[in-house]
Image (tube, grey):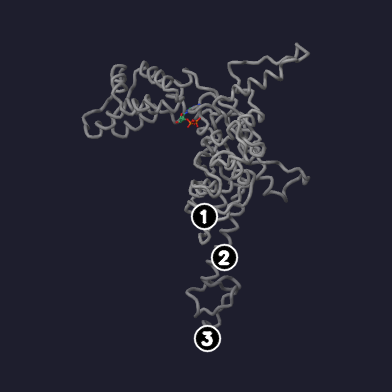
Amino acid sequence: MSEKELIKCSFCGKDKKDVFMMIGGLNGHICDQCVSQAQKIVEEEYKVRTDNKKIQLVKPTEIKQMLDEYMIDQDEAKKVMSVAVYNHYKRILQKSNKEADADKDDVEIEKSNIVLVGETGTGKTLLAQTIARILNVPFCIADATAFTEAGYVGEDVENVLVRLLQAANYDVAAAEKGIVFIDEIDKIARKEGDSPSITRDVGGEGVQQALLKMLEGSIVNVPPQGGRKHPEQKTIPVNTKEILFVCGGAFNGIEKKIARRVQSHTIGYTNPTEELEVDRDNLLQYISPEDLKSFGLIPELIGRLPVITFLNPLSRESLKRILTEPKNALIKQYIKLFRIDGVKLSIDKAVLDLIVDKAVEYKLGARGLRAICEAILTDAMFETPATPQIKELHVTLRYAKEKIQRSSALNRLKAA
Ligand code: ADP
């Protein structure tokens, strides 16, 4: 028998002649198949070990600092959110590090899903999105008004997770540690006077019920392409226990409910020295779960959203700062867009004031800023790429006013 025939893989025992390659070591051999098998095992183990390390526990003060780079004002919301997010990820890490955990007690840290209350365009979405970016976790936005309770025409609540899976490139483990922003949560509130047993409204309470399990944490079978589930369809099980849900809503008129509650608590208060001084110009700061309940969210849902905070309407000054200061400030973006075409863009200070005035007029918060900038700059962005001799564009007040006046997009906005 020749020496060649004697060589066998020390791992699987295959003969050299039956494999593509045999690698020799000091005291044995390994075949190519066992090498690739071993590599897979190493990669999987590496992934398991690093997945947990990947979540970086960023301190609340650091989260807040980073938020400040992208967002103007809203200090209270930033602070509350930083702490909630920190606690949420601390909870995840603690769970996965059970062995290393020094205090093996029975205390289980509960999930800290969040409600953000604030007018449209005050930065609710931006806040959730920026947090996800800071932590480098998958993020998606869903609109609560698109949901329907099972059995009705519309989107099943599970479809939120389809988006999250897509944001995570179908890496289920990553998606399971992501952040979901559910917008317009106030629109599924039970209408005043609704009786749940009589009016099975398509939105409203049924949807709130459908959301409960997902928010709390359960295994949800998600159709990978979205749409309605049907029996033959393959689904991906996604555990929502460690997904952070942030719900946002304008809750129009909730100040009245807050006022009523604050008033009833302060009336008849016997000790005037301890009496709460109520700041009636900013009632949102007193928002409590009770107010969400009087607005029409069901107690079970409120119970699964233990952290509540608010975003203030943006002042003129804040809107102006939003235009130029944040890392991603709109004006910085336009300057970059023009620079790519070799054009130096500059804008009169008075134009910035005009943009803010118009944004206030349209009552769209910071959301209006973009539409107004587009109205002013669209013509220039259309023409300059085809006119290489243009090297500089200076936007004067007159130019801006004229563009705003002629903008059909803005006129539509005004009419709406
Ligand atoms: P909301 O979700 O409250 O309706 P968004 O977060 O979608 O508002 O904000 C709308 C637009 O305004 C976004 O482009 C966002 O970047 C900008 N914006 C809103 N609030 C702020 C803020 N406080 N600082 C910086 N930009 C903001």
> Disc 3 and disc 2: Cα gap in Å?
29 Å
Which residue is located at x 60 percent, y 33 percent?
115
Res. 408 image quadrant? top left
Look at the numbered disc 1 and give the secondary structure of its residue.
loop
Q: Residue furthest front?
A: 198
User: In the image, which disc is placed on residue 2?
Assistant: 3
Which residue is located at x 58 percent, y 62 percent?
41
Give the amino acid at mark 1: Lys
Which residue is located at x 32 percent, y 25 percent?
376
171 or 199: nearer the eye?
Answer: 199
Which residue in the protein does label 2 denote?
A: 38
Which residue in the protein does label 1 denote?
A: 229
Look at the numbered disc 3 and give the secondary structure of its residue.
loop
Give the amino acid at mark 2: Ala
The answer to whether 49 is drawn above or below residue 78 in the figure is below
Res. 298 image quadrant? top right
The crowd level at tag 1 (other Cα within 10 Å; few <14, some 14-19, many 20+) is: some
